[in-house]
Image (cartoon, rainbow, N blue to C red):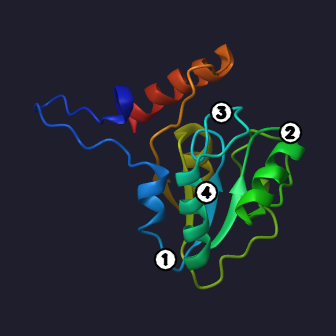
Amino acid sequence: MGYYGVRYNWNTSMTAPAPKSFEDIALTLTDRTVLLDVDGTLLPDGDDTLGASAIIAAKQLAERNTVYLLTNGKDRARINQISSVLGIAVAPSGVPAGKPRVRAVTGIVPGDRPFVVVGDKYLIDGLLARNLKAEFIPTSRKRSGSERTTVRLSYMIDRVVSWLL
């Protein structure tokens, strides 16, 4: 993916469409086990307040699917607050934050439903999906404009990696 999530095709002037917003993606998923990233997908990195459209979309998604929230953040009180607002469980985690490994999500058995990871970062969410042998559905990234420098740098690195994929 290129800048702003557009995949560049250097052989032609055509470009693929940018990833859809979480709210648009949530409307299309049914009968799946969904691992839903929080930061950058539901709300900007580090923010505490969910937008009304994200709350509605997450609740609609949870009505049609089995949904678990994922986060790389260490602030468990924050993710528990978001979980409470949405009425969606937090995925049990067996490793430190930021590790896109299979054992990062313990105790979740998708059963007969397809396993899907929905998130904004290829390096974290995409790798987790690959390691779980799940489908990765990239979303457009939610930004506040006041993200920390390290978060902005990680976005830049992730964008470069997404160009290569």
Q: Is residue 162 left or right of residue 6?
A: right
Q: Is residue 80 left or right of residue 102?
A: right
Dot 4: few (<14), some (14–19), or many (≥20) neighbours within 10 Å? some
Which residue: 24% across, 42% down?
A: 16
For badge 2, the amino acid type reads Asp
Provide the secondary structure element on which disc 3 rests: loop
Which residue: 64% across, 23% down?
A: 151
Residue placed under numbered mark 2 in the picture = 75
Where 18 falls versus 103 (above or below)?
A: above
Residue placed under numbered mark 4 in the picture = 55
Q: Which mark is residue 45?
A: 3
For badge 1, the amino acid type reads Thr
Cα distance, mark 3 to mark 1? 27 Å
Residue 80 coordinates in the image, percent (x, y) = 84, 53
Residues 103 and 42: in front is 42
Label 1 or label 4, whichever lies nearer to me, is: 4
Residue 3 coordinates in the image, percent (x, y) = 36, 25
